[in-house]
Image (cartoon, helix red, strand yellow):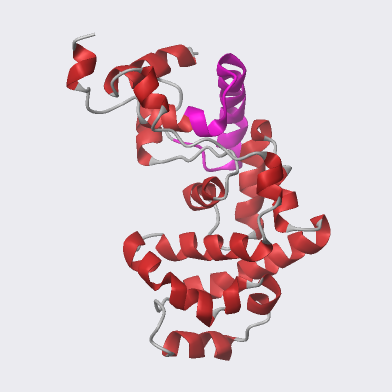
Amino acid sequence: MISFGQIEDQAAMRHGGMEALKAMLQFPALAEDVAAIPDDRWLSEACRIVMQAGFNWEQVDRKWPAFEVAFGGFQPDYVAGLSDEQLEDKMASGTIVKHWPKIKAFRANAALLSELGQQYGSVGSYFSGWRNREFGEHLLELQQRGDRLGGKTGAIWLRRMGVDSFIPTPAVEKALKEFGVVERAPSSRKAWTEFQPILNQWLDETGESLNYISQMLARSCGEVYAEALNE
């Protein structure tokens, strides 16, 4: 299998050197900081990424204060208890984006986070205990138990919250294919069973995070910076 050092070298060449490249990266938060995030902020960001999927992200962001008001600050127990009629009334208000399947997903994910909060003491305590060497299993469980929180959507949500995450973006998938690692980013249980050991090997090799690995992959293909060509 390809050494991750080769991927790092190629990414650095395309982005003006390793120092400049590392300045672009987002690193995971400390476990204690993840654990301290209030439950309502987990639900708010989960609902935001669900709503943004396939939509204009900036438009959703502009309307998000209205979502916060409409959904009571995204307290999980409150959102989980909303009826169909109450959800329909919120859409009819004209202050939020209308999309019935996604609005229903708010309620389903609120129920999940409420359950996690009760079981682990807080939602943050649950996610702070995720092990990056079992990320695929964790993500598949989230996909099974949540609504519209699988794959890239769930991984983006988690990285926004500071959880160490591998995001299977199109750029990452392209890099994995070009380097001959896998033909496509993992999504099924079988694919994750085959891919997780590769990730774990790269974690051992680099001593870095899943954030680091997926961001390096994403930046290893594409335009070569002019200054890098002169090195």
The residue that appears at 34% across and 19% down in the rendered structure is 12
Specify whether residue 18 is in view: yes
Give residue 71's quadrant in the image: bottom right
Q: Position of residue 43 (x, y in %)?
A: 60, 64
> Nearest the camera: 46 or 112?
46
Specify whether residue 2 is in view: no
| Residue 206 included in the magenta stretch of the image | yes
| Residue 207 included in the magenta stretch of the image | yes
Residue 91 lies, with reference to residue 40, above or below; the image says below
Q: Main secondary structure of the magenta part?
A: helix
The residue that appears at 52% across and 49% down in the rendered structure is 160
Residue 181 lies, with reference to residue 75, above or below; the image says above
Q: Position of residue 210 (x, y in %)?
A: 55, 32
Total numbered badges shown on the rendered structure = 0
Tell me: 173 left or right of 159: left
Specify start and end residues of the magenta stretch as a single range.
185-213
Residue 40 lies, with reference to residue 132, above or below; the image says below
User: Which quadrant is home to the C terminus?
Assistant: top left
> Nearest the camera: 174 or 68?
68
**Residue reaching furthest top?**
231
> Nearest the camera: 104 or 224?
224
Give residue 194's quadrant in the image: top right
